Image (tube, rainbow, N blue to C red):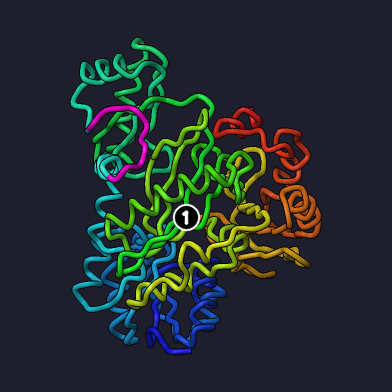
Amino acid sequence: MTKLFDKVLIANRGEIALRIQRACKEMNIKTVAVHSTVDSDAMHVKLADESVCIGSPQAKDSYLNIPSIISACEITGADAVHPGYGFLSENSQFAEILEAHNITFIGPTSDHIKIMGDKIVAKKTVSKLGIPVVPGSDGKINDIDHAKRIAGEIGYPILIKASSGGGGKGMKIANSESEIDEAYSLAKFEARASFGDDTIYIEKYLNTPRHIEIQVFGDKFGNAIHLGERDCSLQRRNQKILEEATSPVIDDKKRNEIGKVASDAISKLGYVGAGTVEFLYQDDKFYFIEMNTRLQVEHPITELITDCDLVKEQIYVASGKKLSLTQADVKIKGHAIECRINAENPQTFVPSPGKITSYHPASGPGVRVDSAVYAGYTIPPFYDSMIGKLIVYGKDRPDCLSRLNRALDEFVVEGVETTLPLFKELLSNNDIISGNYNIHWLENFLK
């Protein structure tokens, strides 16, 4: 196989760093792991060709420390950086600095990250490209009177949202005009506190939507494809818990229609790399909410139903090569589900860092576990609490659910609390078995 890059620095940690590392090794590319002082014994550090300590445990001093990461590139001679997801993966300044240092950012251009990072700009951009958007304000909301006027035009309930950031912060619902004042003030306060930017906008609040996202890919030659959808509707506080592909409510006709709309749009935009166009889906209609300009946590379920290695494809495209497949090559078959297994109390979701005394991941036909932990590993309190991802594939949805039940019974993690019991409970629920749920279902179930 022709070498695409000599050396890739992985600007991340945990299971995603290990996932990227494995793809690089299979492509005969050397890897550099960066790590904080608390991660010196982490699996991604142990298995890399080289490693560089970039700071103390706090993320701002290490995994978000751009000067230290650039220095690590220069010290090791890395000619490309894969950011994974989280941390600096959607930081346009980081991509810009790498570009200035002639180091390839394995992702889109800094300009595209900027465009899609601002939700107001992103909404305007995709609307012009033919993607349907949720009815709402054309731009930022200037004051409460402006908010009330827009809300009156589109009808209640409405959602007041921060233009920057994500994760549900700076997002408030108003069911009537009497609730606007408080929702407006709280949304601006949270947006300013969380993102340093209190710009907000308004969208129509959909009562029973599903969260459907389309995986797209573009190259430097204007080619673009989609690889079907993922249903990410099982969420708590806007954080995904379980994802499946394909969605139980999307048929081939709808999939092809919305997939073509999304891939045509990124082609017109000149977008390069992996991306995810996210929608709310209700009453047979899709409404754009945002685009993530990176690899998603849930990318493995797309890999299983399409037999496409998304990380390798990212590397191909970033190196200047054409996409290795066309839309006609994309064949979607079977069903896949991913459970995010976190070191958290399964009822309260309070993080449970500490030492894993025993660890036995599930295995067998159709079962994949993406994780970077091991027995004796201590989960630090400074980062995301994910232990790993249990990903299961079956010939159809019932087969996949049956296999997932079996895999959950096999999965053993001791020493810390985990969300494993929650998934067992979910899989015994008739709504989950039938696929009859929306983005509000889990919050209601947990009450």
Residue situated in front as seen by the camera: 16 or 6? 6
Q: Is 86 drawn above or below residue 193 in the view shown?
A: below
Give the residue at the far top of this rendering.
Answer: 178
Q: Quadrant of the C terminus?
A: top right
Q: Inspect the magenta stretch and tell me whether residue 136 lies in it.
A: yes
Q: Image check: 336 left or right of 77?
A: right
Q: Image check: 378 left or right of 292?
A: right
Which residue corresponds to the image point at 30% horizontal and 23% vertical from the top-left? 184
Q: Return the x and y of residue 198 as percentages of the image width and height.
A: 25, 35
The answer to whether residue 436 is visible is yes
Kindly identify the amino acid type of the residue bearing the numbered disc 1: Gln
Q: Return the x and y of residue 424 as percentages of the image width and height.
A: 75, 45
Q: Return the x and y of residue 58 as percentages of the image width and height.
A: 40, 60
Q: Is 353 drawn above or below residue 158 in the view shown?
A: below
Q: In which quarter of the image is residue 323?
A: bottom left
Write down the region rendered in magenta: 129-138
Q: Disc 1 designates what residue?
A: 215
Which residue corresponds to the image point at 43% horizontal and 43% vertical from the top-left? 167
Q: Main secondary structure of the magenta part?
A: loop
Which residue corresponds to the image point at 75% horizontal and 49% vertical from the top-left? 401
Which residue corresponds to the image point at 55% horizontal and 68% vertical from the top-left? 308
